[in-house]
Image (spheres, helix red, strand yellow):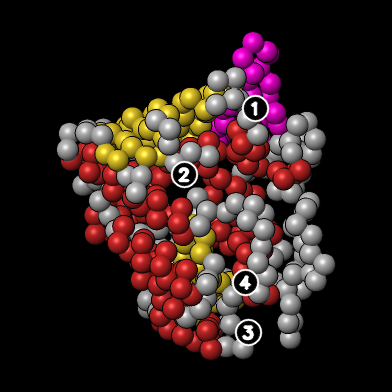
Amino acid sequence: MVDRLLPTDISFEGSFPPLARKLRIGIVGGGRIAATQATAARLTDYWEIVAGALSSDPEQAKIRGQKWFLPGERCYSSYKEMAIIEAGRSEGIDAVMITTPNHVHYDAARTFLEAGIDVLCDKPLTNEYSEAADLVRLTRESGCVFGVCYVMASFPMVRQAREMVKDGLIGRVNQIHVEFMQDWMVPDDVVEADHVKWRLDPAKSGATSCTGDIATHAHHIASFVSGLTMTDLRAEMHVCGAPKALEDTVMMMTRFAGAIPGTLIATRLASGNRGGLRLRVYGSEGGIEWELEKPDYLKFNRYGDPDALLSRGHGSGVVPRVERFVRLARGFTEGMIEAWANLYTEFAMAVAARRDGIELPPDWLDFPTVEDGARGVRFVDAAVESHKSGGAWVNFSS
């Protein structure tokens, strides 16, 4: 039995330390994103998948669990049953990943928090702000770790951009533009696909589809890199393709703290775009630009100087705080799985520290928290409110 997870002489400089044992994680859900996250969690060498609630049908739960190499007694047909039993095991799960459709997030997360189990939940955090606020309250009262899967913030060059803005290398931020362009909803018949139906069902996806799914990534990364909270927006939602119950496109004018203006666009009908997330932050002395489809590179300009293209890797202007997320040398590409692994690495450090009773330095970890998730839900609510009012400005800074 290992009593302590983190080294007794832990240093908060440089690379993340090894743990005395792998952390045990369970899965709620079991679709494509669960498989992606599980692959990333294993890549860190900090996690092992030991339990799952993969189907509400007991037989299917065991069949699916076999594909994950889970023991039969840890293949649950109910996340509530899983939380109760795992909390009572001497070697139960340390944390849970919640990878279900949106409408399940709140009850599942609440169940595990009440069992004293740390949570990493997909976004949007919930479909209702009151539920998101309740999860913030429960997290604070329980002392549990709660991460939210805004994984785009875990790319090394996004972290590099954040550090450069923080260090004043582009001067005072004066505008922020972000877009997330995809094209997988261009075919009219895509609305009939099983993995798409729930995303267009208000009972499961909430009041929005595109906004709650991908515009929330854009909202988070814009604030994460700029260091500024989005305070106001005016939004228009559109169905540009085949008829749908929820929008496939949203366009916004935005304002950040200090009345900094910006734009945000998200759509699933931009032909030729797959992972088309693009962030541009401009300041009084220069600007930075980052694209998801070219994640290893960060464009940096100081006004009047030649443009610079920074690449992911050790050296070449990448700061030590970012190098701890780098696995391969420059020229050997890293991508989405590695970004997920970075998220799971930071989450592991937080979970281990809680188990050890260690208070971490406030600037050691930057993974998105339950508070970030709640802000994302408020952002979605503000977009819906603005759209319904004909595109009026809505303040959501409180």
Q: Which of marks 4 and 3 is nearer the N terminus?
A: 3
Q: Residue 169 carries which label?
A: 1
The image shows residue 268, relative to residue 343, as above or below, that is: above
- How far, Cα to Cα, is label 4 from label 2? 25 Å
Q: Residue at x 59, y 20 (%)?
A: 286
User: Which badge, 1 or 2, comes first in the chain's sequence?
Assistant: 1
Cα–Cα span, label 4 and label 3: 16 Å
Q: Distance between the Cα atoms at labels 1 and 2?
A: 21 Å
Q: Nearest to the eye among marks 3 and 2: give it.
A: 2
Q: Does the magenta stretch include residue 289?
A: yes
Write down the region rendered in magenta: 288-311
The residue indicated by pointer 2 is 220
Residue 297, x across and y down, in percent: 65, 31
Inspect the image, locate mark 1, and give the three-letter code of the amino acid beneath it: Leu
Q: What residue type is labelled 3?
A: Glu
Q: Which residue is drawn at 40% across and 27% down?
A: 261
Q: What element carries label 1?
A: loop
